[in-house]
Image (tube, rainbow, N blue to C red):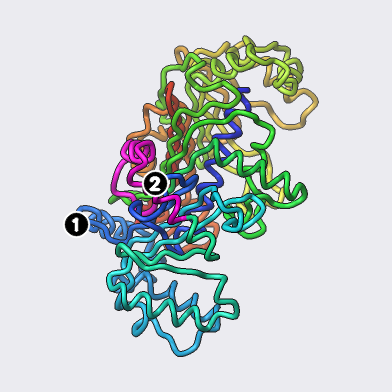
Amino acid sequence: MAAGLGVVLMAGTVWAANTVAQNVFVGSQPESVLPASSIVFAELDLQPDGGQLAAYAQFVDRLPESMRSEIDPEADPAKEIVESLLESSGVEGMTYEEDFEPWLGRNFGVAMWQPDNEDAAVDDSGAAVALAIEAEDEDAARQALADLQSQSEDPGETVFDVRDDFAILTPNSAALSDLEAQVDSSGTMEDNDTYVQDMESLGSGNLASAWMDLGRMVSLAAQSAESDPYGGGLDQYGGIQQPDPLAALEQYEDVTGRLAMGLRIEPEFVELRGDTFDVSVDGVSTADYELPEPGLHLMGDLPDDTVFGFSGAGIADMVGQAYEDNPDQFADLDGLMADLGLTMPDGLTSLLGERTALGVTDLGGSLDQFFGGSTSAPSLQYRADGADSAAVEDAIARMYAGSYTSPPGVSTEGSVTVATSGTTGTGRLGDDPVFNQTMAGTADAHMGMYLDLRPFAESAEEEAPEQWGAVGATITFDAERVSMIARWAPNGG
């Protein structure tokens, strides 16, 4: 069941990230007009306050010059979207400046819910969807949308209503009627106390955000699979012709909890954060586990030329607890540990210790050679605080038995076992300003990842590769939630 908990968290995160990236940027609805019964709600806010505007300006100054030169600070972000839609739809006689700019606001949103009227559904999942666009001039919005509808081959494909300062669009009239009925009976998302509390916990200042009820989302995925067992389920929400990450959830009978995500821009980085709340899979949640003390400081001790780094706190302990609950789910890991002369779960602690870090410093050639499979062995360093150095050395010897490649050398630094292979830097990654900028405020996470983009930019022959900075990601656990952060910190300007 612990594995099931991980599948739900990862599948929900992938799906919601796809939703924000592919759907929210063509429109979104504020909380005041779509139903509180929504299973998924996403919002795009292009009206930042003064503090946000200052952060955006500082972040733009840090972008690589090759990107910064392509940004027009005076450009209207809605114009390109509208003009693209008009062109792809074959609409004639309408322009952004005359028909949309006079009324189009800067707040957008999209919602999906389970309708009472099955005719409102957009596909076999049974879900209904609606898009809300802020309308600063309701009469002008009605006229523009009516003109659009008149040029449609099937006017019934897009139905709209303009009220309460928003234009609300649905794929059919049944969906619009059901939306109104849902709002009348349960209110809007701003009346949904659970949603409001989750988003407050996520934090304000988000450029885009998304929220999902995982339990009801899993039910929709199962319903979609039953109606089309060979199809992609809800793939139209996850992206065209992409595998549906929620399909992996169909095997679980009882899933509860919510997922909230927010995209925000700070002066030094752009960050995507996702928090899960009260997630339980078939009765198992993070509250059932004794969580280890967080801390990623071991990553900072990796070599200063680390290209890719990973660090984790208490990984062996958490995997060990899950193993004791259901050892049958870890048959492959059992086999791997046996090959290394160890047994679960204690053998994993012998290898990983209380805190673990791995840094790759050299891919063994150019990136093209690496991805083409024509490189030598990469250079790396492994660090494990509290590991059994003898067990690590023996495991490495078994792994390299019969190999023509020299095995990593094993040493100790106090309580830390260090295994090094190839050529690594002599300084600390934690002394690199780019690393500190990327991983700022993440020291209390349980798992972290760091990827230096400068070597990749250099391989791509960017004019100033040092300006691309790095990306980082972390995961933090507590009894009620799992928090995930991914950020890019460019180093231009």
Badge 2 local density, few (<14 within 10 Å), some, or many (20+)? Answer: many
- From the top left corner, tell me how far across and down residue 347 is, in percent: 64, 12
Q: Mark yes or no: residue 292 visible.
A: yes
Q: Quadrant of residue 105?
A: bottom left
Q: Label 2 amino acid?
A: Gly
State left or right for residue 306 relative to residue 122. Answer: left
Which region is colored magenta?
Answer: 179-208
Main secondary-structure element of the magenta-colored stretch: helix
Q: Neighbour class for label 1 at 10 Å: few (<14), some, many (≥20)?
A: few
Quadrant in which the C terminus appears: bottom left
Q: Please determine whether, in this image, residue 215 is positioned above or below residue 79.
A: above
Which residue is denoted by mark 1 in the rendering? 50
- On the image, the x and y values in percent for residue 333 come to 70, 21
Asked if residue 440 can be seen in this view, the reply is no
The residue that disc 2 covers is: 262
Q: What residue is rendered at 32% in x and 61% in y?
A: 46
